[in-house]
Amino acid sequence: MRNLIFTAVGDRMPIDWIQPTEEIDFAVAYYGKSEERAAQLKSKVKWFQRGCGSKLQFFWSWYSFNTEELATYSWVGIFDDDISLRPDRILQMFRDLAEHNKENADIVVYSPSQCPSGKISHPIMKPHNFHVHCDNPLPGPLIRRSTFIEMTWPIFRTDFIPKYMQVYRTEIFGWGVDILWTKLVGELGLAMAVLDNYVSYNPKNTDTPHRWEPDYGAWKNFFLSRKIFGSTEEEELYFRNTCRHSYCCCCIFREALT
């Protein structure tokens, strides 16, 4: 079966990594202003749309009209447009995780690891076998199970996506939606893993400033209605192991309740 990569693309980052193959289709949501870039992207990919929003808001819209198409894919990557892996590495990454999943069928979310020289919001995303070159890691464990996958470049097994879409809401966006799939994976008794042999550079905020501020009210209402945190102990554990940015999910939740 084939795989799909969904990404929201602007005008700042290179798009040479967007290279469809016989094994990978692309769906692109373009939020930039360049007609030339829009035409270039539209000519390359299977699905193309324009608009304004976050990648998961765009994906929810695509999913709403393409549930039958989704079932034709094995894995779906929902990537930021700043992934630094070459097209051939991306292709091999999908092949490797599919092979790994044959004997690890409980894993439903994978992600490449994050180069330590870039932005690291969650230390768990750093590779355990890092080499000086992000795309040339040292020999070592290639895939490790993880209790968290950040939202930069997650890859979902297709049968998990409908479950996630049932809890996702378009009024929440940006940093923090990764805790939703983390929570759901745990509730379903499933697992996640980081691909340490595929290391991508995550641009720092000085390289790519965030485009919008989160809606504190929407996050507060969502957290309370979903009861994301089941106990004070669980809250503190999450707060203690997440980033220190003022805009992250846990800080939004903490501030919204004060």
Image (spheres, helix red, strand yellow):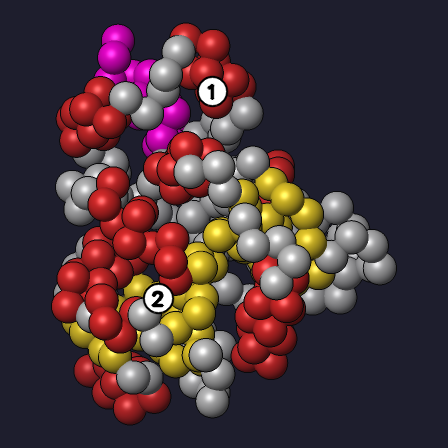
Position of 132 with respect to 52 (left or right) is: right
Q: Position of residue 133 (x, y in %)?
A: 74, 63
The amino acid beneath tag 2 is Thr
Mark 1 — residue? 239
Mark 2 — residue? 7
Residue closest to the far right:
139
Between residue 251 and residue 184, name the one nearer to us. Answer: 184
10 Å crowding of disc 1: few (<14), some (14-19), many (20+):
some
Q: Quadrant of the N terminus?
A: bottom left
Q: Is residue 149 in the magenta section?
A: no
Stretch in magenta = 246-258
Position of 55 with respect to 17 (left or right) is: left
Can residue 93 be seen from the camera position used here?
A: no
At x 39% / y 11%, what residue is drawn?
A: 231
Q: Upstream in the sequence, badge 2 or badge 1?
A: 2
Query: Label 1's element?
Result: helix
